[in-house]
Amino acid sequence: MGERRRADPRTRGVSPVVGKALEASIVVLYISVLGATLYGGVVPDYRTAAGAEVGERVLSQSAQRVQQAVPGVARSAATRTGVEARTEVSLPETLRGRAYSIRADNRTLVLDHPRDDVGGRVRLALPQTVESVEGEWSSRDSALVVVRSAPEGLTVELESGERR
């Protein structure tokens, strides 16, 4: 019968070390592939969807604040002289990690964002005594709604204040 070869005592400990190194390499490779998959597709899509949802809420709440800024007594034509009201509006500084603006377009508020997927428009429900809605807010500045008397009715202005 054949003689059994004896393992060289200098290489006996290599086998477990190589095995553990291969196991660690496989785990690192798995985590890398999983991370690349998530951050390459799923996470950016989720961030954009979440940014769009928050943008819609910001636009809706901003429209509410503009509508609430028109004083109740100024809603009738007989009592609109001498009206001046200022209301502060709270805006988040960023949506989807970027600054944005909200502007008035006739009787509509428009959210402008650098990403096309984030934005929107909302029509304002204002009384007939409101003659015009003008102005723009930047998310980096404080936002005010100013309602003033004008010869033909009331004007609503979106004004930016000091930097935050």
Image (cartoon, rainbow, N blue to C red):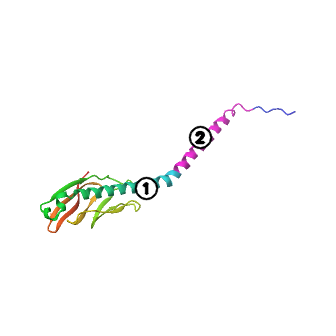
Label 1 to label 2, Cα distance in Å?
36 Å
User: Is 40 displayed left or right of 163 in the figure?
Assistant: right
Q: Which residue is mark 2?
A: 24
Residue type for callout 2:
Ala
Q: Position of residue 88 (x, y in %)?
A: 23, 53
User: Is 106 displayed left or right of 113 in the figure?
Assistant: left
Q: Main secondary structure of the magenta part?
A: helix
| The residue stretch that appears in magenta | 7-36
Q: Circle 2 sits in a helix, a strand or a loop, which is it?
A: helix
Magenta stretch containing residue 15, yes or no?
yes
Farthest residue, direction bottom: 152
Residue at (17, 66) in percent of width and height = 153
User: Is 80 displayed left or right of 1 in the figure?
Assistant: left
Tell me which label, 1 or 2, sits earlier in the chain: 2
Residue type for callout 1:
Ala
Res 64 visible: yes
Q: Quadrant of the N terminus?
A: top right
Foreground mark, 1 or 2? 1
Res 162 visible: no
Q: Position of residue 87 (x, y in %)?
A: 21, 54
Residue 49, disc: 1
Residue 162, disc: none
Nearer to the camera, 34 or 10? 34
Q: Residues within 10 Å of mark 1 (few under 14, many from 20)?
A: some
